[in-house]
């Protein structure tokens, strides 16, 4: 089968949605893998990821020997598992259903074993150069100050499997008549948060993948800064995203900063002057009072104005009372996040 037809037939990961594979070819020469490099692979073992998220958002079921087009990326969940990129990689694990893969680092738990891929070959252009997500990303921006209100949702540890707090905030602001654009600033390129934001009513949605990053683990602080600038600038213009119709120019921007960064990387970002200059208010998401106190202190030290807190702390009235009394923070339930009468004045008042 000709390579163009072979690539068309392969199941392509969501994180490659901006990549133009029209002129892609299989490279005959072997290159050392780097984060963001695109490659063709076949499914060698089915594990925790039994499907792949396609660029249009559909989940495509995976079968043994299926061919997929994915990219190399780094990832780690401390104490559990991770993926590295570099050196010899005769096989690799699918680390995200969005199509990010790397050399598996972790225990081979039978109940949580990874889906393993057998690389067929790296993809390159007609000049024989490896294709990387960075080639298709937005231009990085060196300096930027947002002209619209920017609200940050700080979620260092994802709380549960329900819709992310950022999506609920978007919905609440939309219910208040605010046109909201949104971006996920950290993670491993999952389509889940992206489509949650679209479904919540965001008029434009981006993530770090738009900047040519496969994941945000082990990305330098300077690269993260320039990527955030690029996303804010692009959202203010609301230029069309592939496959998603933009609905209007935004009045405000919601950015999600979640567990796709290491704890130290998140601390550094929140403490950075450039972050404070571009964030008007923050919503802190936490599991308990101890973590809420830590994250709130971190944000306040960085000069970030905290509008409220939310998360799994809400169901316990005693915890809510303690948080309000000790930390001086208002704690919102999911219903309050969605209520325009609550969230509008809280986020938009001067």
Image (cartoon, grey):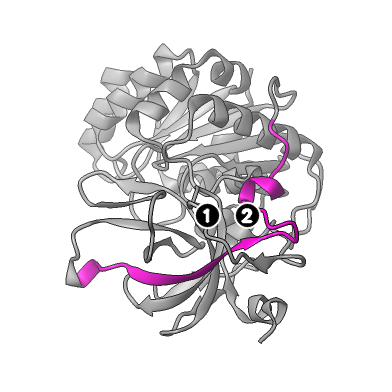
Q: Nearer the viewer, residue 96 or 30?
A: 30
- Quadrant holding the N terminus: bottom right
Check if residue 105 falls in the magenta segment: no
Is 275 displayed left or right of 201 in the figure? Answer: left
Residue 330 shows in this picture: no
Q: Residue furthest bottom?
A: 1
Q: Which residue is mark 2?
A: 130
Above or below, comparing residue 281 to residue 73 in the picture: above
Check if residue 125 falls in the magenta segment: yes
Residue shown at 23% from the left, 27% from the top:
322
Q: Which residue is mark 1?
A: 31
- Which SS class for mark 1? loop
- Which SS class for mark 2? loop
Mark 1 neighbour density, 10 Å: few (under 14) some (14–19) many (20 or more)? some
The quarter of the displayed image where residue 63 is located = bottom left
Mark 2 neighbour density, 10 Å: few (under 14) some (14–19) many (20 or more)? many
Q: Nearer the viewer, residue 207 or 39?
A: 39
Residue shown at 33% from the left, 53% from the top:
160
Which mark's residue is nearer the viewer, 1 or 2? 1
Is 311 displayed left or right of 303 in the figure? Answer: left
Above or below, comparing residue 231 to residue 44 in the picture: above
The quarter of the displayed image where residue 330 is located = top left
Above or below, comparing residue 137 to residue 71 in the picture: above
The percent position of residue 290, horizontal first and vertical second, equals 22, 29
Q: Residue furthest front?
A: 29
**Segment colored magenta:** 111-140
The percent position of residue 41, horizontal first and vertical second, equals 49, 72
């Amino acid at each position: 089968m000709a390579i163009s037809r072979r690539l068309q037939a392969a199941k392509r990961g969501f994180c490659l949605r901006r990549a133009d594979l029209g002129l892609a070819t299989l490279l005959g020469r072997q290159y050392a893998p780097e984060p963001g490099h695109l490659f063709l692979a076949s499914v060698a073992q089915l594990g925790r990821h039994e499907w792949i998220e396609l660029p249009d958002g559909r989940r495509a079921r995976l079968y043994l020997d299926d061919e997929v087009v994915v990219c190399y990326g780094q990832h780690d969940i401390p104490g559990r598992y991770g993926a590295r990129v570099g050196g010899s990689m005769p096989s690799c694990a699918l680390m995200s259903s969005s199509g990010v893969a790397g050399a598996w680092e972790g225990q081979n738990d039978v109940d949580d074993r990874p889906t393993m891929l057998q690389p067929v070959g790296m993809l390159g252009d007609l000049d024989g150069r490896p294709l990387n997500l960075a080639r298709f990303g937005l231009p990085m921006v060196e300096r930027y100050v947002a002209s619209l209100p920017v609200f940050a949702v700080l979620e260092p540890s994802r709380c549960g499997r329900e819709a992310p707090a950022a999506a609920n905030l978007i919905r609440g602001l939309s219910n208040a008549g605010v046109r909201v654009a949104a971006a996920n600033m950290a993670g491993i390129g999952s389509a889940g948060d992206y489509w949650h934001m679209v479904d919540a009513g965001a008029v434009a949605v981006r993530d770090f993948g738009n900047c040519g990053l496969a994941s945000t683990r082990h990305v330098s602080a300077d690269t993260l800064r320039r990527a955030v600038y690029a996303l804010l600038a692009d959202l203010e213009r609301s230029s069309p995203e592939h496959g998603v119709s933009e609905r209007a120019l935004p009045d405000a921007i919601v950015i999600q900063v979640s567990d796709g960064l290491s704890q130290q990387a998140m601390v550094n970002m929140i403490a950075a002057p450039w972050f404070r200059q571009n964030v008007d208010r923050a919503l802190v998401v936490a599991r308990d009072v101890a973590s809420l106190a830590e994250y709130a202190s971190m944000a306040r030290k960085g000069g970030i104005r905290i509008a409220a807190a939310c998360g799994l702390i809400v169901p316990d009235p005693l915890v809510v009372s303690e948080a309000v009394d000790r930390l001086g923070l208002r704690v919102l339930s999911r219903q309050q996040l969605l209520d325009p009468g609550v969230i509008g004045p809280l986020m938009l008042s001067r």
